[in-house]
Image (cartoon, rainbow, N blue to C red):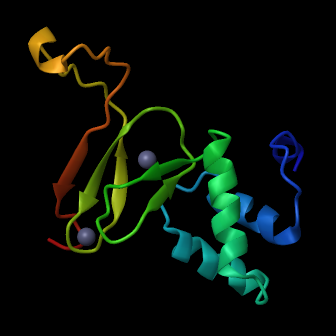
Amino acid sequence: MEKYKKLGLKLTPQRLAVLEILDGNATHPSAEDIFREVKKRFPMTSFATVYNTLNALKEKGKLVELSIDPDRKRFDPDIKPHHHIICIRCKSIVDIHREYALKTPEAERQGFEIIGNHVEFYGICPKCK
Ligand SMILES: [Zn+2]
Ligand SMILES: [Zn+2]
């Protein structure tokens, strides 16, 4: 609770539920997944409430939006830079905490200074194999 106060968000029970669902969540849920969970506790919750909370957290840098899943945006409360692998069948996403030295020659950078990278791997998870 205390750590949520620092976010500067007005904490309604629904918003708190969103925060609790995200806390330590490594499944990279979509907004719909989170909405479904919040609704179990607060059946009157609107999707907009969940969506707006996710956006507010994203803007405050407390949540990362992933585009690895072509079907829907996925969210990651782990804001430490890391990479992902997605199962092309069940769309489960797992983390890869490893640094890749991706050599990008000056000529290909077209004047850009590179400050980070995000590698997306595609594969088939053990369950789907
Ligand atoms: Zn799978
Ligand atoms: Zn992740």
Q: Is residue 31 left or right of residue 101?
A: right
Residue drawn where x is 36% and y is 55% of the image: 67
Residue occupying the far top of the picture: 106
Q: Position of residue 62 (x, y in %)?
A: 64, 42
Residue drawn where x is 68% and y is 70% of the image: 50
20 to 100, vertically: above or below: below
Residue drawn where x is 68% and y is 41% of the image: 60
Is 120 in front, or is 46?
46
Q: Is residue 74 left or right of residue 46?
A: left
Q: Is residue 10 left or right of residue 111?
A: right
**Is residue 80 visible in the rendered structure shown here?**
yes
* Image mark count: 0
**Is residue 27 visible in the rendered structure shown here?**
no
Residue drawn where x is 88% and y is 45% of the image: 5
Q: Position of residue 45 (x, y in %)?
A: 76, 82
Q: Position of residue 78 (x, y in %)?
A: 54, 43
38 to 53, vertically: above or below: below
Q: Position of residue 11 (x, y in %)?
A: 88, 59
Q: Quadrant of the C terminus?
A: bottom left
111 to 55, vertically: above or below: above
Residue occupying the far bottom of the picture: 43
